[in-house]
Image (tube, rainbow, N blue to C red):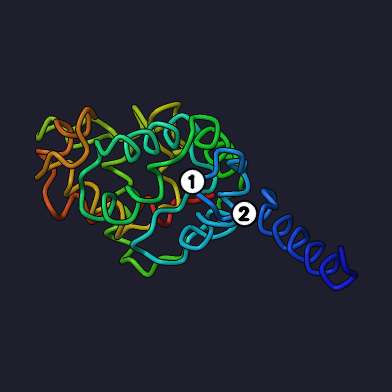
Amino acid sequence: MEYKQIILVAGLVALGTGCANVERSRDLANPSVPGKVLAEQVCSNCHGIDGNSKSPNIPRLAGQQPGYLTNQLNNFRAKQRTDPDGSINMWGISRHLTDAQITGIADYFSKQKPQSNASTADPGLLAAGKEIFEKGVPEQNVIACSACHGPKAQGIDAFPRLANQHANYIVKQLTVFRDTQGRPGTPMEAISHPLTGANEEAVAAYLQAFPD
């Protein structure tokens, strides 16, 4: 083999090795890429490298319960979540994920530190939201949010962390629970039905500005 051919072959091998670097890969169809890498290289584009997304339409994942994240990724992969934002943004991303990758992604974001989420909501609205979170709306048979999501809104196992979540995202999900079958199999379908729009806005505002 001539010297030039050797150089060409060596270059191609090196190029192939670089492309196959699973520690920096964005290949969602490669089962060898660790979930942590996909979280850093792919998920972070929308949710932030630390899980504290800036867009009010994209949920914060920092400090989220790993059991909840695992369940949701499984639901996206199985196309069981049909809410518009979820199906459009997550079906394609999740369709080739392995169980190990899903576990890795959930583990990565659950270990990120949640940041406070600035709010300009009226103090009266925040006070109303606090009341709903801690005591529910008894006259409408709405239980306290803290009963399932924890006294600090930190989440419990399959029940998600809500503290510091974007208010806009929470309201959108409450609407999905109440008016559609986009997120089946959750107790929120029944819980959210009696909530009024004003109640949703109040509790969502309080959760975004949840005190440290």
Displayed quadrant of residue 179:
top left
In this view, 61 is above or below 161: below
Query: Tag 2: Cα neighbours inside 10 Å, few (<14), some, or many (≥20)?
Result: some
> x and y percent of residue 2 in the render?
88, 68
Q: Nearer the viewer, residue 58 or 152?
A: 58
| Residue at position x 53%, y 32% in the image | 103
| Residue at position x 24%, y 29% in the image | 186
Query: Tag 1: Cα neighbours inside 10 Å, few (<14), some, or many (≥20)?
Result: few
Q: Residue furthest right?
A: 3
Residue type, mark 1 in image: Ala
> x and y percent of residue 67 in the render?
46, 29
Quarter containing the N terminus: bottom right
Residue 178 shown left or right of residue 173 in the figure: left
Q: Nearer the viewer, residue 192 or 54?
A: 54
Q: Nearer the viewer, residue 24 or 169?
A: 24
In the rendered structure, find residue 121 and report the number of the disc placed on it: none
Residue 131 shown left or right of residue 67 in the figure: left
Helix, strand or loop at label 2? It is loop
Residue 36 shown left or right of residue 123 in the figure: right
The residue tagged 2 is 25
| Residue at position x 41%, y 52% in the image | 165
Residue type, mark 2 in image: Ser
In this view, 99 is above or below 46: above
| Residue at position x 33%, y 46% in the image | 130
In the rendered structure, find residue 29 and report the number of the disc placed on it: 1
